[in-house]
Amino acid sequence: MSDFDAKKVAEIHEHLHSHLPSESALRVKALETLLVDKGLVNPQTIDAWIEAYTEEIGPKRGARVVAKAWSDPDYRQRLLDDAPAAIDELGYLGKATAHLKVVENSDTVHNLVVCTLCSCYPFSILGIAPAWYKAAAYRSRAVRDPRGVLAEFGVDIGDNVEIRVWDSTAELRYLVIPQRPAGTEGMSEDELAELVTRNSMIGTDRDLGEG
């Protein structure tokens, strides 16, 4: 009779379950399947919306706004003065950006965006809000301990840099213009947009890759 290796069995069990979707993902899939089976939704429509928010409406739009601001000083100033109007120039204006304020990082200032009440977010230019942005821990600690929160994202802010925390509401939302990386002077807007991360436009990323 072969020996029973409880530890080995536990490792196999853990390995197998690590590849399973989360409980919430399984519930969403079950609900989607039920709605499709009853003819209430079209699966192609769902796929189209997911692709739109992750690939088109998502952070790529915000990245193009930032890249244009880096490349065009006049546009940058219009964006800082009247963000909704400047966003509308690119055709990106939506309900979540009709009341938008743009803030800019510098050598001495770092901006961090949070929504302490719920999860207000400019989704028309940043896509679907990340799970951590909606988490109670982030919403409470970003105001009380912004340096500690940023450190957990791997962002070390020196004492010589002021951190400004902006609290979004249903009426006013924020977009951060990160600092343009050194060595990118010859890059096109398309190339610059590739350097911009979603987190940098929220403020949980600071030093972007150099060209």
Image (cartoon, grey):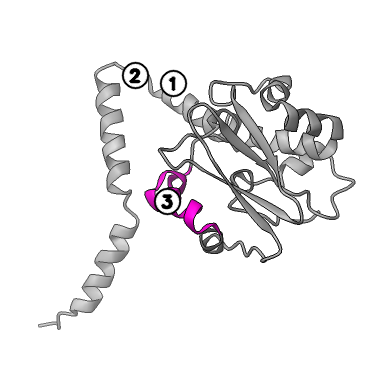
Query: Which residues, given as a range, are shown in magenta?
Result: 130-146
The mark that comes first in sequence, 2 or 3, is: 2
Q: Residue at x 44, y 38 (%)?
A: 119
Question: Relative to residue 32, is residue 176 depicted above or below?
Answer: below
The disc at residue 205 is: none
The disc at residue 45 is: 1
Name the one closer to the observer, 31 or 119.
119
Query: Three-letter amino acid code at disc 3?
Result: Ser
Percent x, y of residue 139: 44, 48
User: SS for tag 1?
Assistant: helix
Q: In this rendering, would 186 be left or right of 119?
A: right
Percent x, y of residue 34: 24, 26
Q: CA distance from mark 1 to mark 2?
A: 8 Å
Percent x, y of residue 3: 15, 83
Q: CA distance from mark 2 to mark 3?
A: 37 Å
Eye-nearest disc, 2 or 3: 3
Q: Residue at x 49, y 36 (%)?
A: 128
Q: Are marks 2 and 3 in contact (CB under 8 Å)?
A: no
Q: In this rendering, would 94 be left or right of 158?
A: left
Q: Quadrant of the N terminus?
A: bottom left
Q: Residue at x 19, y 80 (%)?
A: 5
Residue position marked by numbered label 3 in the rendering = 140
Q: How many marks?
A: 3
Magenta segment, prevailing SS (helix, strand or loop)? helix
Residue 145 magenta: yes
Question: Relative to residue 97, is residue 152 depicted above or below?
Answer: below
Residue position marked by numbered label 2 in the rendering = 41
Query: Three-letter amino acid code at disc 2?
Result: Val
Eye-nearest disc, 1 or 3: 3
Q: CA distance from mark 1 to mark 3?
A: 36 Å
